[in-house]
Image: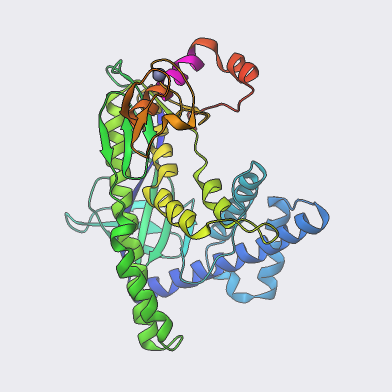
Amino acid sequence: MIISKSFKYQLRLNKEQESFSNQTAGSCRYVWNRGLALKKEAWEERKERISRFDLDNLLTEWKKEHDWLSIPPSQSLQQVNKDLDQAFKNFFQGRGYPRFKKKGINDSFRLPQGITLKEQLSKKVGQVQLPKLGIVRFTKTREINGRIKYVTISKSCKDWFISFNCEVDMPPPEEIPQSQIGIDRGITTFAQCSNREAIPGISPLKKNLKRLAKLQRQLSRKKRFSSNWRKTKQRIQKLHYHIANLRGDFLHKASTQLAKSHSLIVMEDLKTKDMAKSAKGTKESPGTNVKAKSSLNRSILDQGWHTFQNYLSYKLNWRGARLILIPPKNTSLRCRICHHISKENRISQEVFQCQNCGHTENAHLNASINILAAGHAVIACGVEALASTAKQELLIRRPRF
Ligand SMILES: [Zn+2]
């Protein structure tokens, strides 16, 4: 099976390369924001869609207006149009609305062609030739495998990074373990498995939240754009980066471990982004209890459930195993022994006690066993049968490649 994998390294740019990269990222941001504004207006006011082809034609016009748009590699700017097109396709499929880009936040650009790896300078220093940038050096912490499809150059807290996106041919796994589990996701326990194993949460954001709040208070007292303001701003960005790394590491380790050990994993299809949105409500109908909900939402997002689901899905697919998502209906209120459903069964966040048969156990464990059973029902009845009889939306994750 061919899978895509990325390999990320810190770049060692010289002054010229750095200023060129800043300029290119800036031009890409300009093209994104201008294209987005046009697409937004066309859709919101006239329900029209501007195609990628139209955007590429417009780009030629914009280059006549601004000489500086001819400096970066034109393939990078065309990639922006491609990404914008994809972002709108995602939006029309019900995922979030594309956002405008701000300077200094996720500055990046992509190069799909003209990438040649060169001989390494030393054991730790790799070299790659890129269009217009010439030969750039990077700290090589591990080998690059597979065929390079494109590279992304990105900036984070003054440091530049290169990510090689490669196609890797994965050999089929020797043996798929026969174990099947259900997982209940929670706040204090990150994942409770139906086989009684549990993965505690790490909440990296929570641990660093006090520090973050302190820095943000400091920032608000400083004069905007002064040198002290910039310094504090940079420290905040560094902290965000640190938190993201901790969380990414944790999610990778947990998902790898689970994907290695099971042939089927069943989880609830929790739309965490919707949950986060609903707390705030809208202008017309503001949400109730916003503060408490937003703190819960922060922990949900902090745990990175959505990312975890994605990691788990592709890692299981690599191994020929699968992830099934079931609708989260009554899984935490139903007794797994007698199937009695009641709100009173959940006597606390952690404890489940059936009001019908008296069965008592950890609430998350009870839920995880129900989740596994729901997954088995899906396999036995087939997706259509269950979807039409229960009239519930059902999702089965399929490999993306
Ligand atoms: Zn019961």
Task: Name the magenta segment's main secondary structure.
Answer: helix
Q: Is residue 73 magenta?
A: no
Residue 170, position as x, y percentages in the image: 34, 28
Question: Residue 133 is drawn in which quadrant?
Answer: bottom left
Q: State which quadrant residue 158 falls in.
A: bottom left
**Side of 122 relative to 351 (left or right):** left
Residue 349 placement: quadrant: top left
Measured as percent of width and height from the top left, residue 17 is found at 39, 71
Instruction: State the extent of the magenta-drawn residues as a range.
Output: 371-379
Q: Residue at x 36, y 57 (%)?
A: 162
Q: Quadrant of ligand 1?
A: top left
**Residue at the right extreme, as displayed:** 46
Is 245 rendered above or below residue 173? below
Q: Looking at the image, how many numbered discs can be counted on the residues?
A: 0
Q: Residue at x 49, y 67 (%)?
A: 25
Along the line of sight, which residue is nearer the eye, 72 or 269? 269
> Where in the figure is residue 268, as x and y percent of width and height?
46, 32
Residue nearest the observer in this picture, 325 or 109: 325
Residue 191 visible in image = yes
Coloring applied to the structure: rainbow
On the question of residue 401 being in view, the answer is no
Q: Quadrant of the N terminus?
A: top left
Residue 373 painted magenta? yes
**Which of 329 and 83 lies nearest the eye of the viewer?**
329
- The image shows residue 182 at horizontal and vertical percentages of 37, 25
Q: Can you say whether 339 is above or below 285 in the image? A: above
At horizontal 39% and vertical 24% (from top left) the residue drawn is: 354
Q: Residue at x 53, y 69 (%)?
A: 102
Q: Outermost residue toward the left?
A: 123
